[in-house]
Amino acid sequence: MKCRVCGKEANIRLSAYNTALCADDFLTFFERRVTRAVQKYHLIDQTDSTLVAVSGGKDSLSLWYILNRAGYLSDGIYIDLGIDEYSRVSFEKARLMADRLGRRIYRFSLPALFQKGIGDLSKVMRRAPCSLCGVLKRYLMNKACIDAGYTVLATGHNLDDEASALFGNLLYWKEAYLYKKSISLEGRGDYLAKKIKPFFLCSEREAAAYAILSRIDYVYEECPYSVGAKTLLYKELLNKIEVTSPATKIRFVKGYLERVKEQEARPDPERCARCGYPSYTETCNVCRLVERFGTGEAIRIECFEPAQATATPDISAKADAVV
Amino acid sequence: MCSTQRAAASGAYFLRSTARAFFDIGWPLCYLIAMKVAWEGKVYEMEKPLTVGQLLERFSLNPEAHIVVANEKLVTEDCKLSHEDNIRIIRVISGG
Ligand SMILES: [Zn+2]
Ligand SMILES: [Zn+2]
């Protein structure tokens, strides 16, 4: 198989785009797709400052790397869920990237606040670890953004994440969640940061290939709680269809994006009486959690400066030259 | 053929093929050096050289959910792998 652009031996076949590319041309292709999505969907403005939710996995590390390369200088936030070795290694990878980019990384530690990891906390609360993790992450990442003065929170959700979530919501007609997903969710005043997903239309395979080719050192291991998660089954099923009918996933998600535009603007979420962050009840979930199970200390988000501020290789100039 | 006969016959074949590999370095060598594939923390030996597509099929893996790396380079499904290649299969799907 030959590269569509330069004719050299191809390194990756992209059936969804009916093409094959060599390593260099794939990197350019992928970066251009991400920066174009940022521009087309107005994800980041000139005046914005961006914080990337970093898990240590391929998607978030690649995203952090690309945004900085494209001139959207951004820092990272890591949530330590206290899953022993997995959390330790994940943070190590996140710090490696922070140093490579010469950017700051913030860390919130669940065990520091509750003296328990997500596993034990979910047991005493009788709640599934993944749903608890979702609530905590959403809250803490938003808080980190607002408190440190960032206007945009970027997450590494990819095409497969979105397609599988959409598939699950449709399958069980979870209409309350159905139209809540988008490539960007506007922020509200001084208590809710704008949320963006620049990899919305990039497949998980592309993100992994990008990470490998860019020599990004990421955690291969799965979060131990995601084993047997329904998401994995949906992803597997969608990939079976994708192999026989390429571009199914991207059409599915693009079709959704067109339909979600027609939905009405959502009302402002209420604010928690205690912390002031978004909540659907008088006191938010996290405030109640901290009150019941916390050690009495306030939520603290640490900040780590990079080992040395290295200049980030900038592709924004290159992109301009092409235009 | 009883089991002892079978063992004796295969032993003789092994000696013969080893001898041939030593002396004429012909086709039996390919079968003596198996193709090694790293997958999920284990190393598997494949008796015959394969293409990347055939390799994924052999492991029943979906090409949309896996990437094959040979000698630290990404390879497409039509690429022919040989026993000298250092091969790794990487799973790209995570729970998220
Ligand atoms: Zn090329
Ligand atoms: Zn609150």
Image (tube, coloured by chain):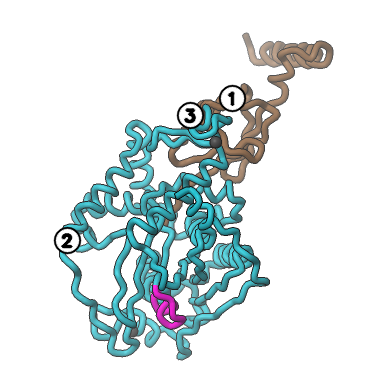
Chain colours: A cyan, B brown
* Marks 3 and 1 belong to one chain: yes
Query: Gap between marks 3 and 1, in whole Å?
Result: 14 Å
Q: Are marks 2 and 1 in contact (CB under 8 Å)?
A: no
Identify the element where label 1 is drawn.
loop
Q: Residues within 10 Å of mark 1 (few under 14, many from 20)?
A: some
The residue that disc 2 covers is A263
Please state which of residues A279 and A28 is positioned toward the viewer in this rendering: A28
For residue A114, side relative to residue A231 (left or right): right
The quarter of the image that holds ligand 1 is top right
**Residue A214 on image: x %, y %:** 59, 50
**Residue A287 on image: x %, y %:** 35, 84
The residue that disc 1 covers is B80
- What residue is rendered at 34% in x and 87% in y? A275
The numbered disc on residue B57 is 3
Identify the element where label 2 is drawn.
loop
Specify start and end residues of the magenta stretch as a single range: A142-151
For the question of whether residue A124 can be seen, the reply is no
Q: Residues within 10 Å of mark 3 (few under 14, many from 20)?
A: few
Specify the subunit that label 2 lies on: A
Please state which of residues A34 and B36 is positioned toward the viewer in this rendering: A34
The type of residue carrying mark 1 is Lys
Question: Which is closer to the viewer, label 2 or label 1?
Answer: 2
Query: Gap between marks 2 and 1, in whole Å?
Result: 50 Å
Give yes or no for residue A17 being in the magenta stretch.
Answer: no
- What residue is rendered at 45% in x and 41% in y? B65
Question: Which is closer to the viewer, label 2 or label 3?
Answer: 2
Identify the element where label 3 is drawn.
helix
* Marks 2 and 3 belong to one chain: no
The type of residue carrying mark 3 is Glu
For residue A53, side relative to residue A10 (left or right): left
- What residue is rendered at 41% in x and 49% in y? A202
